[in-house]
Image (tube, rainbow, N blue to C red):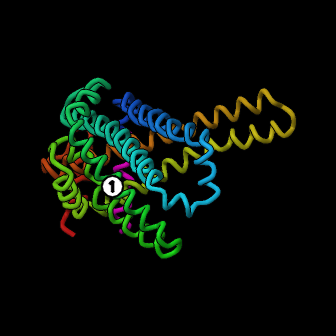
Amino acid sequence: MFERLSNGWEMAQESYRVLKLDKELLFFPLFSGICCTIVMASFLVPAFASEEVRAMLDNPDAAAENPLVWVLTFLFYFLNYFVIVFFNSALVACAIIRFRGGDPTVADGFRAAGKRLPVIFGWALVSATVGILLRAIESRNEKVGAIVSAILGAGWTIATYFVVPVLVVENVGPVDAVKRSWGVMRKTWGESIGANFGVGFIVFLGSIVCFLPLFGGGFLLAQGSTALGGALIVIGLIGLMIVSLVSSALNTIILAALYLYASDHEAPQNFDQRLLRNAFATR
């Protein structure tokens, strides 16, 4: 396990080197975040303007029995999954272009994702269905339902970890995408976890740096220094946003690298072949 974590940490560093070659990849998680915020606002603003919705918030049990609530929740899940998968597909496509010797642009990513709209739509439907089923299980029993839902949700997340690159490269349906994703995951589960640990550690360090001006700004605001305190808080928030974008991009680059090695049996360009060979070594 320690060897896998070490390998994963090195893969996180390799993905950062790739990101430095294609900084425009950061636009995709940025666009995704903006679009998800718009989707959320389009649901929340009308909802809180409705007296019926406010009444249901005071009575959660009644809300759980209302079919309209479930329909709107499903639609909310679907739109969010569609947005996330679309932009992740664009990012994966750009990473694969770089790994195969090309020089990707943002337009290349959007073009590749656009060609996969039908399968992205289908996968968003499947993901939303699974999400609503897990939510229904959780709502049946506050304690037991939450545990069962968490276990099933974790299993689903693991099994579908490589679905996006499968959709981008192989253009298959949801069932085949899950099968292929699970096949790759069984080979690389250690490095996938280790790489996430490595990226998480980078994010942790970056977040600490960003929290310093936030704390400093809060202290100055409490002391009455509004201008300087507000400026430090803005700097800290911008820093946290950048850390979040980098984290998302790094995880997707690693995802694409592991998938490509699993399917092509060749190390992608700009990525250490030793790390990927170790990831797929016989356990």
Is residue 89 within the magenta segment? Answer: no
Q: In which quarter of the image is residue 212?
A: top right
Is most of the magenta stretch helix, strand or loop? helix
Above or below 169: residue 69: below
Viewer can see residue 97: yes
Q: Is mark 1 on a helix, strand or loop?
A: helix
Farthest-out residue, left:
264
Give the number of callouts. 1
Farthest-out residue, bottom:
144
- The foreground one among 52 and 130 is 52
Is residue 15 within the magenta segment? Answer: yes
- The foreground one among 214 and 146 is 146
Residue stretch rendered in magenta on the structure: 1-16
From the top left corner, tell me how far across and down residue 276 is, in percent. Answer: 24, 53
Answer left or right for 234 relative to 104: right
From the top left corner, tell me how far across and down residue 190 is, in percent. Answer: 31, 63
Q: Residue at x 74, y 31 (%)?
A: 230
Answer left or right for 112 relative to 151: left
Answer left or right for 176 relative to 22: left
From the top left corner, tell me how far across and down residue 117 is, in percent. Answer: 24, 36
Query: Which quadrant: the N terminus?
Result: bottom left
Residue marked by disc 1: 129
Q: What residue type is disc 1 on?
A: Thr
Answer left or right for 236 relative to 81: right
Query: Which quadrant: the C terminus?
Result: bottom left
From the top left corner, tell me how far across and down residue 274 is, in percent. Answer: 24, 52
Q: How crowded is mark 1: few (under 14 residues within 10 Å), some or many (20 or more)?
A: some
Viewer can see residue 7: no
Q: Residue at x 34, y 30 (%)?
A: 21
- The foreground one among 149 and 232 is 149
Q: Quadrant of residue 18?
A: top left
